[in-house]
Image: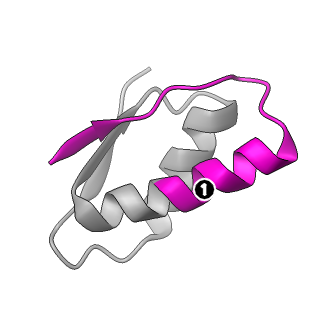
Amino acid sequence: MQIAVIGAADASAEEYATACAVGALIASWGTLVCGGLGGVMEAACKRSTGARWPEGGHPAGYG
């Protein structure tokens, strides 16, 4: 499964924390696709790379 994440580059602390949690969750299910350049996308991508991938999920960043 591939899930894309998009969001603001100037994310608040709460948005950043939420994106981190979402990135880890997505990576545990499959592949996270995002730009990963800043803010929400950066947080989701960063956290997904630290997640455990029981089913082989991984981040795919484009940017």
Which span is picked out in magenta?
A: 1-22
At 31% from the left edge and 68% from the top edge, which residue is drawn? 28
- Please identify the quarter of the rendering in which residue 61 is found: top left
Residue ID for mark 1: 20
Q: Is residue 53 above or below residue 48?
A: below
Residue 43: give x, y in percent of width and height: 62, 46
Q: Is residue 21 above or below residue 34?
A: below
At 48% from the left edge and 69% from the top edge, which residue is drawn? 50
User: What residue type is disc 1 on?
Assistant: Cys
Residue 17: give x, y in percent of width and height: 72, 55
Q: How many marks?
A: 1
Q: Is residue 4 magenta?
A: yes
- Please identify the quarter of the rendering in which residue 51 is found: bottom left
Q: Quadrant of the C terminus?
A: top left
Residue 26: give x, y in percent of width and height: 36, 56
Q: Is 26 positioned to the left or the right of 22 in the image? A: left
Q: Secondary structure at mark 1?
A: helix
Q: Is residue 8 magenta?
A: yes
Along the line of sight, the residue nearer the viewer: 14 or 60: 14
Q: Is residue 34 above or below residue 29?
A: above
Q: Is 59 positioned to the left or the right of 39 in the image? A: left
